[in-house]
Amino acid sequence: QVQLVESGGGLVQPGGSLSLSCAASGSIYSINPMGWYRQAAGKSRELVATIGSNDNTNYADSVKGRFTISRDNAKRTVYLQMNSLKPDDTAVYYCHVDRWGSDYWGQGTQVTVSS
């Protein structure tokens, strides 16, 4: 049984920063790619960033240079550091793990960027 629990969302002013965490439990290994996706109201879920087994990273163009994804394999935790936040970053952020072709998702954490 795989579970992903996100934390760290909240309300922040434009230009501010937030850090998200996602702790995995169950049979998750360093080889399994992990990532963050987001879904804004009325829009489809979209990729934000992913990190592979050798720490190779991939970012959506909209967040490059502002967001940083990292992982701690010993803690089975993936992080998303978000800087220079914009109102367009407002969404529910979901943690994801690809476990040999099976997708697992967290429950989501709300990030709201507003003055």
Image (spheres, rainbow, N blue to C red):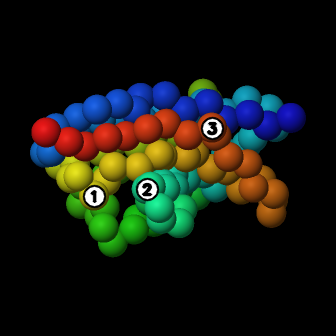
Secondary element at image label 1: helix
Residue 6: image x %, image y %?
Answer: 55, 33
Question: Eyeballing the image, is 27 above or below 100?
Answer: above
Residue at 48% over, 46% down: 93
Q: Given contact means CB atoms under 8 Å apart, are the residues at marks 3 and 1 in contact?
A: no
Please, what is the three-letter code of the amino acid marked with disc 1?
Answer: Asp
Please, what is the three-letter code of the amino acid marked with disc 3?
Answer: Gln
Residue at 41% over, 49% down: 91
* Residue that sits furthest to the right in the current view: 1
* Residue that sits furthest to the bottom in the current view: 61
Residue located beneath label 2 in the image:
40
Please, what is the three-letter code of the amino acid marked with disc 2?
Answer: Ala
Q: Earlier in the sequence, mark 3 or mark 1?
A: 1
Quadrant of the rendered image containing residue 98: bottom right
Q: Quadrant of the N terminus?
A: top right
Q: Tell me the number on the disc at residue 107.
A: 3
Residue located beneath label 1 in the image:
88
Residue 104: image x %, image y %?
Answer: 73, 48
